[in-house]
Amino acid sequence: MKKIIFLCLCMVMLCFCLTACGDDNANNDTTGNSETNSTSEDGLMNDIGNDVGDAIDDVGDAVDNVANDVGDAVTNGFETYDDAYDHFMKQLPSNDGKYEVRNNDKDLTEYTSGRQGYHFELHDSTLENDSKLGDFYLDSEDGKIYHSDDNGKNYSEYDFSTMK
């Protein structure tokens, strides 16, 4: 899948290059000063080269972003805290500011024997006292969200449909 996306993006970049290099705006008038003409043509070529270089950088960034997203979707795992946080927040029903994450650690945490994930302490911001809803861990490998029991020892996969 990554190779197909990369190939498509390369084809788009090739189209940009051909369009930019195929433009014939050069001054073909030979009656003027040839030094001025060559300087303006050099400047135009430098501008085109810079634009192509920028386009290549942008395509490379886009390929990296798509590859990371595809990798996350295929493996259901998350490589960065920000990706894990976004996924976690999307799981919450109607996140209209009611829920907030506190005391989170942006590093992977071993939450049970041999399993690592990102820790999220979820709170209900509409409650005044003891708004903590629990400790959640988004597994970095399988992408599933686990909830700890009150003792913090047993972890089970959590279904957010129970939250209303």
Image (tube, grey):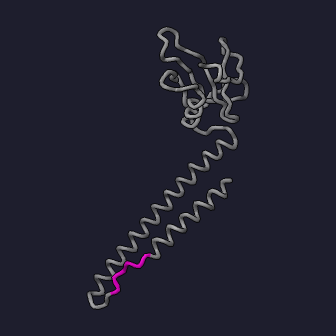
**Residue closer to the observer: 84 or 115:** 84
- 13 displayed left or right of 20: right
Picture residue at 67% right of the left edge, 57% below the top: 3
Residue 141: name its quadrant: top right
**Residue closer to the observer: 68 or 22:** 22
* Depicted 96 relative to depicted 84: above or below: above
Quarter the C terminus occupies: top right
Q: Reply yes or no: does residue 103 show up in magenta.
A: no
Task: Tell me the magenta residue range.
Answer: 23-28
Picture residue at 43% right of the left edge, 76% below the top: 23
Q: Position of residue 19 (x, y in %)?
A: 48, 71
**Residue closer to the observer: 8 or 2:** 8
Q: Residue furthest top?
A: 129
Residue 7: name its quadrant: bottom right
Q: Position of residue 57 (x, y in %)?
A: 49, 58
Q: Residue furthest left?
A: 32
* Depicted 49 relative to depicted 81: above or below: below
Picture residue at 49% right of the left edge, 25% below the top: 96
Q: Reply yes or no: does residue 27 show up in magenta.
A: yes
* Depicted 129 relative to depicted 63: above or below: above
Q: Position of residue 13 (x, y in %)?
A: 53, 64
Q: Main secondary structure of the magenta part?
A: loop
Picture residue at 67% right of the left edge, 24% below the top: 159
Number of on-image labels: 0
